[in-house]
Image (cartoon, rainbow, N blue to C red):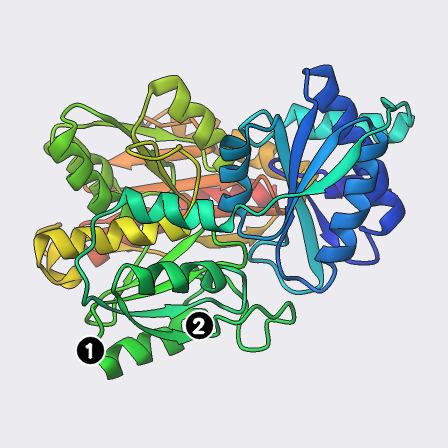
Amino acid sequence: MNPEVFREYDVRGLVGRDLNPDFIYGLGRAIATLARERGAKVMTAGRDCRLSSADYQAAVVRGLIDGGLTLLDIGLCATPMLYFSIRHLGTDGGVMVTGSHNPPDFNGFKICVGPDTIFGIDIQRLRTLMEGGRYAAGAGRAETADIRQAYEDHLFGNVEIAPGLSVVVDGGNGVGGLFALPLLRRLGCRIEDIYCDPDGRFPNHFPDPTVLENLQELIARVNASGADAGIAYDGDADRLGVITDQGKILWGDELLLLFSRFILDKNPGAAIIGEVKCSQKLYDDIERHGGRPIMWKAGHSLIKEKMKEENALLAGEMSGHLFFADRYFGFDDAIYASLRLLEILSKTGRRLSDLLADVPKTFVTPEIRIDCPDDRKFQVVEAVKKRFRKDYPIIDVDGVRIPFADGWGLIRASNTQPVLVLRFEAETEARLAAIRQLIEGTLQEIMSA
């Protein structure tokens, strides 16, 4: 058993090498043991379209059943549909088999005990249970359940979108397009779709809307058609990519800023959560529009936990995870988020490219990723923190973010990969270069020591 498959937020690894039917059966037994300790009796199970997902779902369901649980199999679905099923069917948790936005030779498991995904210590508890092999046992059973229409009806009734919006949808050959297209057409949108047929080989591009090259065809189609917006879903439709009518990408923090304005208009004083990689423009704009901005750790499970703690109505990440507790359940659902975007266009009658035209321009880097071994990356961040704390104010909710009067820089350790993540923003190109030089220079000194 490869211990590295037990990540911060999920269980994930290479098909065949890390993940095989015996391992997955044991994982199902471990999940059942953990869930039954917390009173669970009935859980939901679903899967994405990866070539290994049907077999992996069958193996994990066998383990869950032998662990004494009743399983409701909802079949092929998006991850937010699995989350929805827990609430709609009243189950005690769920397991989603998905490799999300990773390459085709990966797969994984997002696990809910209760309505929310488990993470951190609970993921490691599964590992401990599997290493010890001491599982709860019982005679469970499996049933099928169809929640597709209930999910579509719920989203349809949740938004107000006038017919006639023109939208290009790139499903990335994941499951998002399969469920989004009928809903968008039912709402009266004029749709041009690309790669919306599920294909677990992902023959056209990886279903990751945070990677620029994966959005090039969507941008070209929006520009050619004059569409009101372009929408991209990741492999399991819990992350959203958006293209404006002028072919510009709106990244996660820009989408969060846009949504926050409309939520604050009806909910003054609401708490809204971003993560440490988000632009300072986001936090300033939330405050300017009467909201309570909260900067928090990256990671969908951590964000959802913080939302409950703060009673926040909205949260988001640079990765395109967007969480609406305003009129919705508070989990990350890219299909729902795309509808909220189209609702804004419908109700304002304005072009998407105009809606953020008043946001001040800054110079910002994309995420910069530097290889750093797992056993060293957190030590490096601590050393950077110690060095800068002497002379600068720092924000250390997740790594170290150093704010300046006209910009900021961030170094944090990834929770999922052996890398350090850096990002920088400033009011001018010259200051961006200076901030980078200061922080990257310090990092280089520490890493080479």
- Secondary element at image label 1: loop
Q: Does 103 sit above or below residue 262?
A: below
The quadrant in which the N terminus is found is top right
Question: What is the total number of numbered labels drawn onto the structure image?
Answer: 2
Residue 368's image quarter?
bottom left
Q: Residue furthest bottom?
A: 224
Q: Which amino acid lies under the numbered mark 2 shown in the image of this protein? A: Glu
Q: Does 358 sit above or below residue 142?
A: below
Q: Residue sitting at 67 percent across and 25 percent down?
A: 122
Q: Does 185 sit above or below residue 41?
A: below
Q: Is residue 220 left or right of residue 138?
A: left
> Crowding near pointer 2: few (<14 within 10 Å), some, many (20+)?
few
Residue 238, x across and y down, in percent: 47, 49
Residue 130's image quarter?
top right
Q: Which amino acid lies under the numbered mark 1 shown in the image of this protein? A: Gly
Residue 333's image quarter?
top left
Can residue 361 be seen in the rendering of this structure?
no
Q: Nearer the viewer, residue 355 or 146?
A: 146
> Crowding near pointer 1: few (<14 within 10 Å), some, many (20+)?
some
Q: Which residue is mark 1?
A: 226
Can residue 289 be seen in the rendering of this structure?
yes
Q: Nearer the viewer, residue 397 or 225?
A: 225
Residue 105, x across and y down, in percent: 71, 63
Q: Which residue is mark 2?
A: 213
Q: Does 89 sit above or below residue 197?
A: above
- Secondary element at image label 2: helix
Nearer the viewer's eye, disc 2 or disc 1? 1
Q: Earlier in the sequence, mark 2 or mark 1?
A: 2
